[in-house]
């Protein structure tokens, strides 16, 4: 399989953002770099339908970790395809969920670059509209660690809408610890630090440079 960096090298006709889009759609299997879209789709469908790929382990498992309770919760897990092209082939390329595909790619690239990865949850007590105290669950897409380097990650396709941005960073603000917090957006952003001290960075920049 070809990782995102190699995919960018193969994809000569456009930008890194274009290359990431191609990678989200067709993954990194060797012949998925064919120029003809129909040929790529047929190639990936053929791979998925072969006995080898049906029997192969093509999913990776991410466990859930409760931040407040400081323990892994075994019953709740997430699963990611080792290649997004195979995921899309299984669905006949009918459900191009951009956020889910980006989340899948980020998980894969973190694992391939030697990080330990899980997703994290914690509860907070908040007031509802009537003033009653309620327990609210919060989830952070990923916690990644390699040696002494560690950070929380939230994934978003677009944060130009303030409501969307506030929703994505809300867990960061509520968590309020000293671990680096990163909002990865599927836009061509360079890394910049927000006034609330989390990093916002474009997906291509994060995948190709930041996590290396």
Image (cartoon, rainbow, N blue to C red):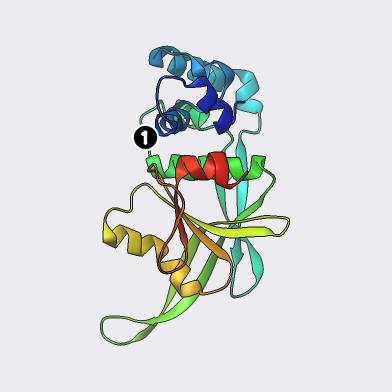
Q: Would you place residue 5 above or below residue 150 in this image?
A: above
Q: Position of residue 183 (x, y in %)?
A: 45, 55
Q: Position of residue 156 (x, y in %)?
A: 40, 50
Q: Visible in this render: residue 119?
A: yes
Q: Would you place residue 125 above or below residue 39 in this image?
A: below
Residue placed most toward the observer, 122 or 156 = 156
Q: Position of residue 197 (x, y in %)?
A: 47, 67
Q: Quadrant of residue 131?
A: bottom left
Q: Position of residue 40 (x, y in %)?
A: 46, 16
Crowding at dot 1, Cα within 10 Å, few <14 / some 14-19 / many 20+, comes out as few
Q: Residue at x 52, y 62 (%)?
A: 181
- In the visual, does 13 lie left or right of 131? right
Q: Residue at x 34, y 59 (%)?
A: 165
- In the visual, does 99 lie left or right of 33? left
Q: Quadrant of the N terminus?
A: top right
What number of labels is visible? Answer: 1
Residue placed most toward the observer, 158 or 37 = 158
Question: Farthest residue toward the right?
Answer: 147
Q: Circle 1 sits in a helix, a strand or a loop, which is it?
A: loop
Q: Visible in this render: residue 137?
A: no
Q: Quadrant of residue 161?
A: bottom left
Q: Quadrant of the C terminus?
A: top right
Q: Residue at x 52, y 40 (%)?
A: 105
Q: Would you place residue 166 above or below residue 189 in this image?
A: below
Where does label 1 land, which residue?
Answer: 95
């Amino acid at each position: 399989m070809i990782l995102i960096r190699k995919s960018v090298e193969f994809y000569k006709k456009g930008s890194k953002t274009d290359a990431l889009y191609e990678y989200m759609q067709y993954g990194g299997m060797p012949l998925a770099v064919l120029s003809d879209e129909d040929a790529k789709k047929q190639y990936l469908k053929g791979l998925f339908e072969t006995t080898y790929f049906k029997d192969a382990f093509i999913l990776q498992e991410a466990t859930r970790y409760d931040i407040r309770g400081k323990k892994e919760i075994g019953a709740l897990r997430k699963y990611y395809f080792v290649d997004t092209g195979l995921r899309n082939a299984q669905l006949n390329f009918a459900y191009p969920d951009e956020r889910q595909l980006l989340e899948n790619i980020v998980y894969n690239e973190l694992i391939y670059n030697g990080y330990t990865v899980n997703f994290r949850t914690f509860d907070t007590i908040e007031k509802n509209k009537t003033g009653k105290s309620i327990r609210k669950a919060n989830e952070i897409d990923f916690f990644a660690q390699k040696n002494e380097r560690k950070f929380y990650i939230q994934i978003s396709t677009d944060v130009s809408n303030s409501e969307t941005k506030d929703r994505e960073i809300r867990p960061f603000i509520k968590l309020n610890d000293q671990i680096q917090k990163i909002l990865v957006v599927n836009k061509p952003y360079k890394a910049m630090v927000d006034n609330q001290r989390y990093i916002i960075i474009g997906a291509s920049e994060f995948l190709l440079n930041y996590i290396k």
